[in-house]
Each structure stands twice: as structure tokens, then as C-alpha cells.
Image (cartoon, rainbow, N blue to C red):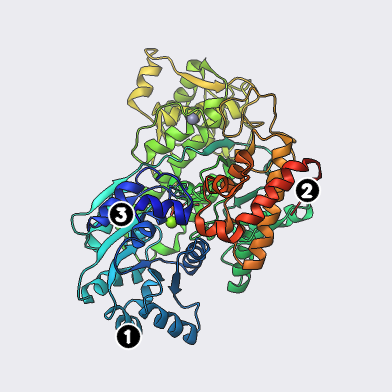
Amino acid sequence: MDKYQILKQYFGYDSFRQGQEQLIDGILSGRDVLGIMPTGSGKSLCFQVPALLMDGITLVISPLISLMKDQVSALNQAGVHAAYLNSSLTASQYYRALSYAREGRYPIIYVAPERLLTEEFLDFALHVKIAMIAVDEAHCVSQWGQDFRPSYLKIVEFIDRLPVRPVVSAFTATATREVRDDIIDILMLRTPDVVTTGYDRPNLYLEVRSPKDKYGTLKEYVEQHSGQCGIVYCLTRKLVEEVCQKLIKDGYSVTRYHAGLSDEERRRNQDDFIYDRAAIMVATNAFGMGIDKSNVRYVVHYNMPKNLESYFQEIGRAGRDGEPSDCLLLYGGQDVVTNQLFIENNQENEALDPLSRRLIMERDRERLRKMTFYCFTNDCLRDYILRYFGEYGSNYCGKCANCLSRFEEVDVTEIAREIMECVESCRQRYGTNVILDTVHGANTVKIRNYRMNENPHYGSLSEIPVYKLRQVMNHLLLKEYLAVTNDAYAIVKLTEKSKEVLSEEMPVVMKMAKESPRTGKKGAGETGTGNGKDAKGQKGKKISGTENFSGKEESMFEKLRTLRMEIARAEKVPPYIVFSDKTLAHMCILKPKTKEEMLAVSGVGEFKYEKYGQRFLECVRAAAENPENGGGSS
Ligand code: ADP
Ligand code: MG
Ligand code: ZN
């Protein structure tokens, strides 16, 4: 067999995705490789396909038990014998698995890094032929990343103990330079073939809103997405509890996850979400590492996270199957304050010396500021993220709320000048709030204490709504017409550019939304919104990929989902491991009648066909004949 046959037969796919083939070819030619590809781009296949072609065992190192379990069940479902060795096995299960492994029953074995140097495991590893070590989530070796795991440092020591050095392949979605260099150095990759496919996740629709009523907005949103799976991230445990309670009260299928819950409850809730027993997961950022669930259709941030690294990682859990999925951030001014408090009180930094601590705080404040700007930019949101990570976007993606909104260019020179003059007149001593309150003419204790009510600019812009003043202020900061100091006080300072504005040499023009800003949804994940369909109130719309479905196909999709759920229950695996949403949607479009036609569906391989093909063919046939009695399941 060759790599294409493996791809078709076991995984049911016709072609490789970007980067996969190069990495697979590298491995097969005996080279070390490093694959840097975004979440959901298909990194697993890059080591699984060659593992099935190489002579010997592939050991996959993975940081989390849940990740291993998931991938091993997916492989077994596809007809590949794989096993995992970690602390979730009892001693007798562990020894049984090892003895099967010795007999050569598994071409692929997942192992926790902690196990590598144990006596039993070494005894096994030294007596079999190991063709490749694949290090998944390889950024865990780096202290620069957010998920450093000391046990990952054992990998090299383990490789050193082997009589013959196998091919070493490493994979991650984290692409900063420091992390990349760390992976190569620490894992001692030998002139690796480094393949980077870029950060973009074109199937994610990006949107930011600044609603007055966050819960109301969230409720409306989950209502519009009923029947779909989604994650709602909150900044604090308290908010997780609150939002979760409200959603339960409003009748939604919800569960929750945060570090304050018992291990037992966290595991249970996570499983409820993964097995589609609960549609919505409300969680802090403690949730998500190792979640491979492919059909998460939306990620809502109830609060703005602390930086774009976190945001990108968290929205990365949406749409792993490549189908259109939505990422909505609900911004509120309080989020900035909460994040600032986290930065000031970061316990993790307590052990550091004062200088390093100060530098880290400065870095964190800067990251928070860039995150805040993301919430205020009126330019392409995708472009903003890509630039942040050092890539060049196209200025216009056509798949974010900003690209799809109608903006107009507004001349705000007068407002800008007034704000700058106010900054100047109080000798650049105050933060944004004091400045804005002054020009707006707010009558607060703070303003009176600072005697800003006596400032010549006090109340000079009283007729302009505060939200608009804030937009202008943010624009001025974003475009460096003004700057703020990088300390806890964030004092507004003039810049070179302010001088040009003040001396009337330079006008300030910015984009402002034409209609009511950031309400309603603009064509989820699709540029063409002229199909007369409004996302609002469209209950029962199941996955975005099914948008063009007829009623008949929709009911077929429902029936296939029900069948998938039955099978998943019987096999005790998550539904998406039986078939992904994408595969079911493809079935509805192709409506296969024969084995050959079924095998042409993306995601249906020989082995899965043997197991379930007949039942799905039958289901498609019945649904095609009897479209009316469908829908309304699970
Ligand atoms: P990553 O580890 O990069 O986040 P995964 O390996 O979990 O991503 O793959 C994400 C999804 O993409 C899985 O559902 C996988 O089956 C699917 N996939 C991978 N490669 C292909 C391909 N060549 N064609 C179609 N789907 C693919
Ligand atoms: Mg992965
Ligand atoms: Zn865009």
C-alpha cells in the first residue's frame, strides 16, 4: 500500500491537506520533521499515515490522557490497531497492553511522557523495533509556551537510551519563534524538515460585539444556534456558575467546567460535552486543552481574554472538522479591569526577581492592550490576528463581522483635537477615563478631586455620546495618535503624530459602522447573504455546512445523526468518532445508494464501511423515500 491508499482505506479521505504530504514524505524518507499547523488542520494524520507504512512501531507522545483516549478510539474505529499506555490503566491492563505490544499487535502506541523512563517501559522499548517517535503538542517542551510540561524533557533522554535512533517527528499549533527553536533544540531534531502552514483558519467567522446586556445577547445567540455544540468562555469561576445557572434556567442543555470543581465532576462534565449529552459547555480557560471534539460549531467569549494568544487558542476549538464555525467575543469595559487585576496579582510570578517580574507585567499589559484593540478595530479582524502573529493577511477576508459590515469614513479631527488638547492642558497626567469624563463633562467625585471640572475643556464635547468618544479614543491609541504608559496607571501621553494633528496639519479619519453598530449577525461564515435567509430565529439549523440544504436533506441529516448517536452509545465512543458532522453532511449531498458511492463520501473508509456502511445506506434510503417524518431528534 502507498500513502494514498492508506488515506483512503483507513481514513476515508481522497486527498491530503496543505502540509500533510510534505511532512509524511519527509518522515518516510527517514528525516526528522517539525509540523507547525493550526488546530484542526490534521496533524495527527501526518504521523499516523507513515506509521502504517514504516517497518516497526510508532510511539506517540501526548500530554493528556483524554487526547490519547480520543485518538486511540478514532484509530480503532478506523480499523487501525492502536493502544495507549498511561496512568488511566490498571496495573493488569497496563501489563496486558505491553505484552500485546511486544507481540507486535499495535503499529501505533500512545504513551505518556512520564512512562518513558520507567523500568517496564524501557524493557519493552529496548526489545522491539521502534520506527518513529512522534511528539504531539510539542510546544509542551518549551517554557516559553503556556503549557510547559517538565515530563516532556524526558523524551530526549529516552531517545538516547534506544539502540537505534528512530525518526523523530514533532507537531504543534504554536508558532512563535522561541517555541519553534526550543522544540528543535530540546528535542534535538536532526536537520528537520520544518513545515509551517500559517495561522489562518478560514472556516472561522470572527465577530466582536459590545452589548449592554451580555446575557441577553448570549441567550439570543445560543437560541439561534440551537442543536449545535458550543463553548462559552468566562473569565472567572463565579461567572461560569452564574451564566451556567441562567442557561439551565432558560432551558438549555448546558454543563460547566472550572478549576474549582472536583476532578470527578470535571471529568463527568467534559464527557457530557464530548459525547453530545450537553450541547453547551460554559467554562474558564481551564477547559479545552486536549479537546479534539470536531463538531464544536461556535465559541463565545463572554469576556475578553487576557491576550490574543489565549483567544486564538480558545477559538481554535471551533470547527476542527473544517466546517464553517463562529467565534463571537462579547466585549465589556469591565473585562479590561478584571484582566488588569489578574496581571497585577499574578501568583505565578511571585518567585521571580523584581526586575523579571516587572518585565513580565509590562509584557502582559502590552498583550492585553493589543487584545483590547482587537475589540475596537473596524478593520478586518482576521487580518488583525494574522498580523499579530507576524503573518500578512489580505486586509479583507470577507468572513468577519468587520468585512461584512458597512462602514463609512468619518472625519473626527475636531473630536481628536479636543481630546489631545485636554491631555496637553492637564500636563499628560491622567488615564483615558479621566480625559473622556472631562471632555464629556461628567460630574463625578473623581473629576472634582482632580479639579478637572475647572479644566478649559471640561464639557467641551458634552453633546457627543460617550460610546462614540470612546471609539475615537481607541482609534487614536490604535493608530498611535496618542499613547498610554505601560504601567498600572496607563496614563495618556501625546506622540509625534498628535503634534501634527494639533498643528492642524493632519486630519483624523476613521471607519465607523453605518447602522446600529455590532448588533445582529451578518451572514454567518458566508459572504453571500443574499439568499433571503436570516440567521435570526432559524431554529433547527444544525450545522453551518448544511446551510444550503433543502428540507429533505435537513431531515435526512437529522436521521443520520440519530443513527450515529445510537451507534456511539453502543460502542461507547463520542459520536464524532463514528463519523464527523462533515461526513454526515456529505452523505446528505451525495445520497449514496451503493457501496462504491458510500466509499466516495469523505470520511468513509473501508473499515468503517464494513462496520456501519449498510446501516447508513439503509438510513439514507429511508430518508430519501420518506422525508416528511424526520427532524426533532436528540
Ligand atoms: P490537529 O491535531 O491538527 O488539530 P486533527 O489531526 O485532530 O487536527 O484533525 C482534525 C480533523 O481533520 C479530523 O477530523 C481529521 O479527520 C480531519 N482531517 C485530517 N486530514 C484530513 C484530510 N486530508 N482530509 C479531510 N479531513 C482530514
Ligand atoms: Mg492534534
Ligand atoms: Zn475580515
Q: 596 or 151: which is nearer to us?
A: 596
Distance between the alpha carbons at the discs numbered 2 and 3 = 47 Å
Q: Earlier in the sequence, mark 1 or mark 2?
A: 1
The residue identified by callout 2 is: 632
Expressed as whole percent of the image width and height from the top left, the position of residue 147 reads 40, 61
What numbered label is drawn on residue 527?
Answer: none
Q: Looking at the image, is 1 positioned above or below residue 263?
A: above
How many labels were placed on the picture? 3
Q: Residue at x 56, y 66 (%)?
A: 259
- Label 1 with label 2: CB-CB less than 8 Å: no
- Mark in front: 3 vs 1: 1
The residue identified by callout 3 is: 179
Distance between the alpha carbons at the discs numbered 3 and 1 = 31 Å
Which residue is at the far top?
Answer: 505
The reply to whether residue 214 is in sight is yes
Q: Secondary structure at mark 3?
A: helix
